[in-house]
Image (tube, rainbow, N blue to C red):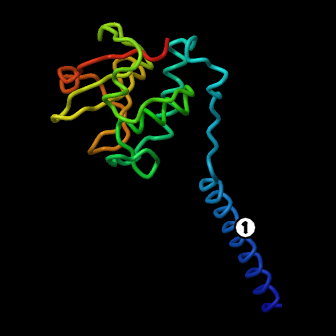
Amino acid sequence: MIVRKFFEFHSQSVIRLSGTVFLCLLFLGVGCAPKVVIQTPASTLPAQTAPSSTVSVILLGQFQAWKGVPHRIGGSDRQGVDCSGLMQAVFRDAFRMDLPRTSREQSRLGQKVDAREMRPGDLVYFIDKGGDHIGVIVENGKFLHSSSTQGVILSELDAYWWPRLKRVQRVLS
């Protein structure tokens, strides 16, 4: 009788333990499941008619896709990307636009816009540390770019960036 109760007690403990292990594995598996990002296909939003709020949403989606990718001179993929490579990839993926490869060539696209009239989707061109740098306005004075020290980030047009701003080009009508 004592032996039987001992085995019943231990078998129930094993069942509870295996159930707990199963639930932990189930929760861990859900956390590791691949994430699917659903994005509006660029072909349904022609670049010529996309309102600013829609452009902001699309660019924020691009930021999420590229966030934290390290800076790499000459890079154009998620292993590492420089500022012009990022602009080329973002405009290709988000707006189906082929931009030239260098920031200097990109900064001459479209039409020049007064800095006080910039809007989401406008390219912002800087001279920083003696070199060319380019990003894209996302919303409210924030721009997406590839920082040489932090990788792909959103930055404010603040006291550091504002004096370095040399040109704003509108490439989306």
**Circle 1 crowding by C-alpha within 10 Å: few under 14, some 14–19, many from 20:** few
Please give the residue where the numbered disc 1 appears in the rendered image.
Answer: 19
Percent across and percent down for residue 30 are 65, 54
Percent across and percent down for residue 153 are 36, 37
Say left or right for 37 vs 110. right
Query: In the rendered view of the protein, which quadrant contains the N terminus?
Result: bottom right
Front one among 83 and 97? 97
In the image, residue 159 sits, relative to residue 24, either above or below, namely: above
Q: Residue at x 28, y 18 (%)?
A: 167
Write down the quadrant of residue 112 in the picture.
Answer: top left
Front one among 68 and 164? 164
In the image, residue 52 sits, relative to residue 13, either above or below, namely: above
Q: Residue at x 63, y 51 (%)?
A: 34
Percent across and percent down for residue 55 are 51, 19
In the image, residue 146 sits, relative to residue 168, either above or below, namely: below
Q: How many marks?
A: 1
Write down the quadrant of residue 83 in the picture.
Answer: top left
Which three-letter amino acid code belongs to the residue tagged 1?
Gly
Q: Residue at x 44, y 52 (%)?
A: 79
Front one among 109 and 68? 109
Percent across and percent down for residue 91 are 49, 29
Say left or right for 167 vs 4. left
Say left or right for 110 vs 19. left
- Assign a secondary structure to mark 1: helix
In the image, residue 25 sits, relative to residue 142, either above or below, namely: below
Say left or right for 73 vs 55. left
